[in-house]
Image (cartoon, rainbow, N blue to C red):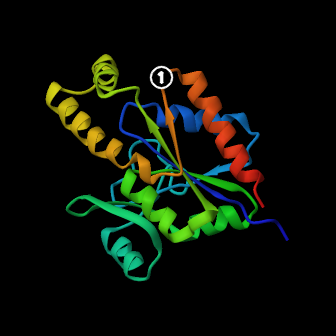
């Protein structure tokens, strides 16, 4: 029987490089990581595949799964639009002996820690400061100044919760942030 895998949760404000760090870790292949596919009630976009990009569910099926305790975390981002992490997805990947990496918001990450305790490692990726985060978001050129203000305000809230995480990585240099995150996860996986 395979040794059960561990759970790694990474949370960060938008624009902190969380997805880039996660993708680098997955591509590295040295940590035996699987990525959790989230469930959503939104319709698939062109080219998206059920079970690969998301598990696409009707609102009724999503609500039924909530009632059955099938999610370890979920959020209704606006009425009828849900996103969540299926307990079965965590169990499947860790049961196969793989470690799983989750990309969640602060509340979802801390909720997973409450459920899984020492079997989960929570990592908060922070910007060097809010001014640098604003600069990065502006540099992207994908959001209006009003949306950037909302994201920076949200980031301030999220950063106020960073002390509740097992570890904090400041992404002031991407290569260092990736390496520091890899080392943290490697040490966690090595624990019995």
Residue 82 appears in the rendering: yes
Q: Residue at x 24, y 64 (%)?
A: 80
Count of number-bearing discs: 1
Q: Residue at x 85, y 71 (%)?
A: 1
Report the front residue among 20 and 53: 20
Q: Relative to residue 13, is residue 101 drawn left or right?
A: right
Where 142 falls versus 5 (above or below)? above
Furthest toward the left, the residue is 146
Q: Position of residue 127 (x, y in %)?
A: 40, 29
Mark 1 closeness class: few <14, some 14–19, many ≥20 residues within 10 Å: some
Q: Kindly indicate the quadrant of the structure image that contains residue 131.
A: top left
Where 95 falls versus 20 (above or below)? below
Q: Residue at x 44, y 79 (%)?
A: 69
Furthest toward the front, the residue is 163
Residue 39 appears in the rendering: no
Q: Position of residue 48 (x, y in %)?
A: 47, 46
Q: Position of residue 183 (x, y in %)?
A: 69, 38
Furthest toward the bottom, the residue is 68
Mark 1 secondary-structure assignment: loop
Question: In the picture, which quadrant includes the C terminus?
Answer: bottom right
Where 57 falls versus 190 (above or below)? below
Q: Position of residue 137 (x, y in %)?
A: 31, 24
Q: Relative to residue 67, is residue 48 drawn left or right?
A: right
Q: Residue at x 68, y 48 (%)?
A: 33
The residue indicated by pointer 1 is: 172
């Amino acid at each position: 029987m395979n040794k059960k895998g561990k759970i790694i949760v990474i949370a960060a404000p938008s624009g902190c490089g969380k997805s880039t760090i996660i993708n680098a870790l997955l591509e590295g292949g040295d940590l035996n990581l699987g990525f959790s596919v989230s469930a959503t009630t939104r319709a698939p976009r062109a080219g998206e595949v059920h079970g690969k990009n998301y598990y696409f569910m009707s609102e009724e099926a999503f609500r039924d799964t909530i009632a059955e305790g099938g999610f370890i975390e979920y959020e209704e981002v606006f009425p009828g639009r849900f996103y969540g992490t299926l307990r079965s997805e965590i169990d499947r990947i860790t049961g196969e002996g793989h470690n799983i990496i989750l990309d969640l918001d602060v509340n979802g990450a801390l909720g997973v820690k409450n459920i899984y305790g020492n079997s989960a490692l929570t990592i908060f990726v922070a910007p060097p400061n809010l001014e640098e985060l604003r600069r990065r978001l502006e540099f992207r050129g994908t959001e209006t100044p009003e949306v950037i203000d909302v994201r920076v305000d949200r980031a301030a809230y999220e950063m106020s919760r960073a002390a509740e995480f097992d570890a904090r990585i400041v992404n002031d240099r991407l290569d260092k942030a990736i390496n520091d995150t890899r080392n943290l996860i490697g040490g966690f996986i090595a624990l019995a």
